[in-house]
């Protein structure tokens, strides 16, 4: 089957990495999966032309609004993977909520990474709870009576946790990274807490800055390092200005995935302070590398981190 897969593909972001993994999985199953950045299309008519030109038979989108809004009305079946901000943030905006409801109504299936995401979608759009089932088995039904499916079917939201793979660079040099971060201390005595995120408000990278700075003043071997791409230019300037005047906190730009995994492997702990998460790839990768996790107590994080068992959850900077 020839599939179109839409996602927002900002480099080195969680959505881009997740989309690439899903594409690789679908291609390994024998499908042709064309992954495109949803931001490259300005209207559904452009999508329609692309579908015809590429002879596409079905489509998927990661994020109910950003990618999903472009898929209805093209005469091919499609599925949706919830992203996180679609369910946690975009639903609060009336027009986006309406658009997403229509997309979900027409979608053949929808995938949630966690039970809490599924329950949020069911509450929001009044889809009744269903038994757990693997979404790929449903996707295979595309070949059978695709246009006969009831567009109002309720049994369409499936839970499938993310799969991750970590491949730390074998040539990465931790001391070089510390020098780049302007941390001039012996690596043997350092406690580096790593926060991985694109610089945008929903990730709230400044939430813990003051608390870590205070900790650094008491224990100079404690540092917080923020790593990630500059997604929101205005907010990025705010973050840079704050970090510049704050002791014990460093800001590093985006990194290649293999190098980032090596940084995670060498740090003391990974921190997540997001206001909203679907399922944080950074948290999953830290767990895979057996690195401690400290995460803000929000539904997306609490679905992954069991407090005191697989990590620690905090509700305020002081609590952290």
Image (cartoon, rainbow, N blue to C red):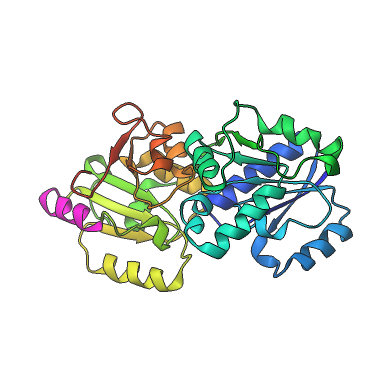
**Relative to 292, does residue 175 appear above or below in the rendering?**
below
Residue 53 location (% of width, % of height): 88, 60
Q: What residue is rendered at 51% in x and 58% in y?
A: 90
| Residue in front for this viewpoint, 123 or 262 | 123
| Residue in front for this viewpoint, 251 or 200 | 200
Span of residues in magenta: 209-219
Q: What residue is rendered at 35% in x and 57% in y?
A: 204
Does residue 267 belong to the magenta stretch?
A: no
Classify residue 160 by image quadrant. top right
Left or right of residue 140: residue 286: left
Residue 137 location (% of width, % of height): 73, 29
Residue 182 showing in the rendered view: no
- Quarter that holds the N terminus: top right
Classify residue 233 by image quadrant. bottom left
Left or right of residue 49: residue 311: left
| Residue in front for this viewpoint, 234 or 47 | 47
């Amino acid at each position: 089957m020839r599939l179109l897969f839409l996602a927002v593909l900002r480099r080195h972001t969680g959505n881009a990495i997740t989309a690439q993994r899903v594409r690789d999985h679908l291609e390994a199953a024998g499908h042709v999966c064309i992954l495109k950045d949803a931001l490259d299309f300005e209207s559904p008519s452009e999508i329609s032309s692309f579908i015809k030109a590429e002879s596409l038979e079905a489509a998927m989108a990661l994020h109910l609004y950003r990618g999903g809004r472009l898929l209805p009305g093209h005469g091919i079946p499609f599925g949706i993977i919830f992203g996180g901000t679609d369910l946690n943030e975009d639903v609060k905006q009336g027009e986006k909520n309406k658009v997403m409801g229509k997309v979900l109504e027409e979608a053949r299936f929808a995938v949630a990474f966690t039970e809490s995401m599924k329950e949020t979608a069911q509450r929001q759009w009044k889809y009744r709870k269903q038994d757990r089932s693997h979404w790929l088995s449903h996707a295979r039904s595309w070949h059978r009576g695709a246009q006969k499916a009831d567009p109002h079917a309720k049994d369409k939201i499936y839970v499938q946790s993310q799969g991750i793979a970590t491949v730390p660079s074998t040539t990465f040099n931790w001391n070089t990274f510390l020098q780049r971060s302007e941390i001039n201390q012996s690596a043997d005595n350092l406690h580096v807490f790593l926060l991985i995120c694109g610089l945008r408000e929903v990730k709230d990278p400044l939430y813990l800055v003051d608390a870590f700075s205070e900790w650094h003043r008491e224990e100079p071997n404690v540092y917080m390092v923020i790593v990630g791409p500059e997604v929101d230019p205005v907010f990025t300037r705010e973050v840079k200005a704050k970090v510049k005047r704050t002791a014990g906190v460093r800001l590093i730009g985006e990194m290649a995935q293999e190098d980032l995994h090596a940084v995670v492997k060498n740090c003391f702990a990974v921190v997540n302070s997001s206001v909203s998460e679907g399922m944080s790839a950074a948290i999953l990768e830290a767990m895979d590398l057996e690195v401690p996790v400290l995460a803000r107590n929000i539904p997306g994080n609490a679905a992954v981190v069991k407090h005191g068992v697989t990590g620690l959850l905090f509700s305020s900077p002081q609590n952290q």
